[in-house]
Amino acid sequence: MAGPRSLNPGLRALRPAAFGADPSGARLARIRRSPHFSAGVFQNPGGEARTRPSGSAREFARIYFEKEARSHRAPTGTVPVHATTLADLARPPATGLRLTWMGHSSVLAEIDGQRVLFDPVWGERCSPFPFAGPKRLHPAPVPLAALGPVDVVVISHDHYDHLDLPTINALAGTDTLFAVPLGVGAHLERWGVSAGRLRELDWHESTHVGGLTLTATPARHFCGRGLRNTQHTLWASWVVAGERHRVFHSGDTGYFDGFRDIGAAHGPFDATMIQIGAYSEFWPDIHMTPEEGVRAHLDLQGGRPAGALLPIHWGTFNLAPHPWAEPGEWTRDAGAEAGQAVATPRPGAPFEPGGELPTDPWWRTVSRPGPTPWRRPRPVAAPAEPLRDEADLAGDR
């Protein structure tokens, strides 16, 4: 079986460092032995998932670039960010579990005396280039250097809005460990993280850090950072279990039946961090809608409203045609209909899932009202034909 093709020397010299590195050697041999790797690529649970937009290119472009729609994809003023301080985090959580959403999918989880940082993105843009690509809608709530020591950084997959070169460069100089899906370690090693600090896992494999057990679990998504998507790095959701508490981070994923299996094997959870943003009927297989996110949370909890649901992957970068704050509002509605507690903290505001949850709809003060500003969508059948002219408009989400 052939591995990823190497770039010729001239192109390799022009390749941005942010593209990372293709797996090779023993890492590539391990990838080829994975039960989830077949026909030269990693396979999704539940069958093939469309990783490029489907439907009419003209319709996609109209929705994405139409002036009125664009006016709703950014806040009208300054997003109310909680300026996280060391004082906020110096006091141990009274319940033993505290979450701080830093925006998008970045969450600091303090769990049973350990500190876990999920998908940290402190860069200004989720892009290989500092001058182009989706820009932050709000600043990071706290400088990375002021966050304090982190026991382990967990990466869900290698897209730019989850694996950020400037952030990894900053963390490479610390003592933190990194738990990553199979193949992603090649990027980190190229960026200066030593192999001894990597815990590189296939789905259903676990590693131990302090008193925590971290398990890579399936997700329905894709990978890729460079000009070619070789599908040689895995994507994952994550379970982190301590002596008293358990949390789940979805990474990016479409809805699939496997959430029930993950819940049965590892749940119930004190809190789940679930992707509910950057959805579209043009790519229904790889991102969840708010309704699907709530359903995934219930699946993980054995079908019962339990634990706290923290919506992630929204409000920080403009990655889809929907209004920027729509995911927060619709998750709030879907949770209320299901009787499920949903936490909606301002970015940077710590909270304890076992205590009083933040539920203020803070985004409404900086959102542009429309004719029906918070109308939830009706189910839309996904167009069947793949995009031809605009296949790369969505980019890495």
Image: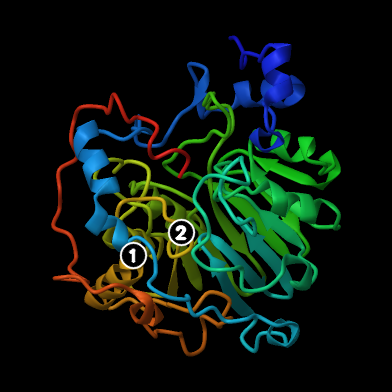
Towards the viewer: 216 or 327: 327
Give left or right: position of 258 versus 338. right
Q: How many marks?
A: 2
The residue lying at 43 percent from left, 77 percent from top is: 344
Q: Amino acid at mark 1?
A: Pro
Towards the viewer: 62 or 257: 62
The residue lying at 64 percent from left, 33 percent from top is: 19
Quarter of the image where one finds residue 371: bottom left
Quarter of the image where one finds residue 240: bottom right
Report the disc number at residue 327.
Answer: 1
Q: What is the quadrant of the C terminus in the image? A: top left
Does 69 sit above or below residue 14?
A: below
Towards the viewer: 56 or 152: 56
For the residues labelled 1 and 2, the Cα–Cα distance comes to: 9 Å
Q: Amino acid at mark 2?
A: His
The residue lying at 62 percent from left, 64 percent from top is: 241
> Measured from the top left, where is residue 151 in percent x and y?
77, 63
Report the disc number at residue 313.
Answer: 2
- SS for dot 2: loop
Earlier sequence position, callout 1 versus callout 2: 2
**Is any part of residue 304 visible from this angle?**
no
> Measured from the top left, where is residue 137 in percent x and y?
49, 64
Does 322 sit above or below residue 108?
A: above
> Measured from the top left, where is residue 160 in percent x and y?
57, 45
**Is any part of residue 13 visible from this angle?**
yes
